[in-house]
Amino acid sequence: MSSYWLNSVKDKPSFTTLNKNISTDVCIVGAGIFGLTCGYYLSKQGFKVVILDKNDICQKVSGHTTAKITSQHNLIYKYLVDSLGIKYAKQYLDANQEAISNIKNIIDNENIDCDFEIQDSYIYTTNENEVNEIQLENKTVNTLGLNSEFVTTSALPFKIKGAIKFPNQAQFNPLKYAVGLANAITKNSGEIYTNTAVYDIKKNGHEFLTHTQDNCISSKYIILASHYPFINAPGYYFLKMYQSTSYLIAVDIGDKTFNGMYINPQSPIFSYRFANYNDKKVLLVGGADHKTGSKIDLSNAYSILENEVKKFYPKSTVLYRWNTQDCITLDKIPYIGEFSNLMSNMYIGTGFNKWGMTSSNVAANIIVDNISGKTNKFEDVFKSTRFHPIKNSEEFGNMIKETTNSLIINKFKVPQQRLKSIQHDSGVVLEIDNEKIGIYKDKDGKLFAVKPICTHLGCLLSWNNIDKTWDCPCHGSRFDYMGKNLYNPAIKDLEIIEIDCTN
């Protein structure tokens, strides 16, 4: 089943595929909410803007989010104070609080009907051992200037031990918001091209040349808004981030609705909020997180969420199921600003750590200020070229180990299997004649074979048995069972392999 958000907008604007060479001031690669927000602000300032996306607008992460607009990014502020000090922790908080106001201003100014609602946001726990951590977070947040509150009751259908409440946060329908941004951009003479994949970007003197399959865009500035950057050097973001997959369901629980947005801090994570659906409210429940490409059985990912809901609403009905993936930085802070000190006028916003609604607005404002020659008051804490000791050394070690163990230059112990032993509707990696072959057998027994090597940096792919995709455990690229690229940083499809099944 697909994301509810993608099905909630019936009259989306249509955009054409780029079919000519063009020139512009700013070329934005990616038409998610971050790319569209950049385009919106720049076009309002009079910049000539071109936005490119290999799909339609907001078809990937932005169209699969929980769409919480909040500065409450799990229990992050005590961590930031301890890691970076009060100054940077306050910058992070203030930037995201300001983003909530910025988003509301855009909605009001452009008259965007996107189900925007002010809601309080909560991080709750049912575990007595986590109460002290939440209390310390609340104390820290108040020290930074936000009047958060520690509470021991909530509107959830179960008892909690405690929660930190952020007042006056918000939620909306991200697709309706994106459509409003796109309409405003085109009204301001900005250009949006969909089904237009970017394959390469080159610096040519003082301009950039962005290459699609058949055409080229020349621009003074480039903004990489493609979620995970598909350009490896000189930014080397693949050494500083990994991707995490999480799952969501939209559930009709009847008339028993409640206010607020909720999430708990530790695994198993469950996130709750309501959304408008056909003149009623449906409950969105998210969770079951795991590192993208992990070699684990994913068949129960949705049932974990469904079983949790059924505990409290046994007669509920699941209307939609979908999943999403997010870039996770090792120090928990997004990378926003220059792509590299060695490549001026190329900008990036990535690593939003599952909190892309406010982070995308923070990133857009910082980058637009940079392009406009202004200094943004929040840019220091998010500086994309920052270099300081890795705080999350354990995860860094795990990521490097995963990358090293998965590279094609290493040898793998893959058991020999025969094609007939592959179960229907499942995928495996076989080693045949010293070559690795990824094979999916569909429900009717038809075989689809690919070279299971990620086209990004050559990591061995894992089979995802719930989405029927080949997933990269190194940096989160994903491909469908026929080899088509679905998620970057890879941009090329997998090599198709013909197999002889007659012997």
Image (tube, rainbow, N blue to C red):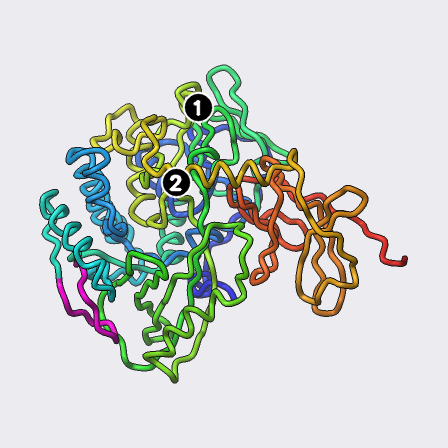
Identified by mark 2, the residue type is Glu
**Quadrant of the image occupied by residue 455:** top right
Judge from the rendering whether residue 191 lies leftward or rightward of residue 349; answer left or right.
right
Q: Residue at x 18, y 61 (%)?
A: 163
Q: Give whichever of 87, 182 is nearer the camera.
A: 87
Q: Residue at x 25, y 52 (%)?
A: 70
Asked whether the viewer can see residue 191, the reply is no
Label the magenta part by its dominant secondary structure.
Answer: loop
Q: Residue furthest top?
A: 205
The magenta region covers 151-165
**Quadrant of the image occupied by residue 336:** top left
Residue 440's spot in the image, x, y percent? Answer: 70, 58
Q: Secondary structure at mark 2?
A: helix
Residue 406's spot in the image, x, y percent? Answer: 59, 40
Label 2: which residue?
394
Label 1: which residue?
220
Residue 76's spot in the image, x, y percent? Answer: 25, 46
Q: Residue at x 40, y 20 (%)?
A: 344
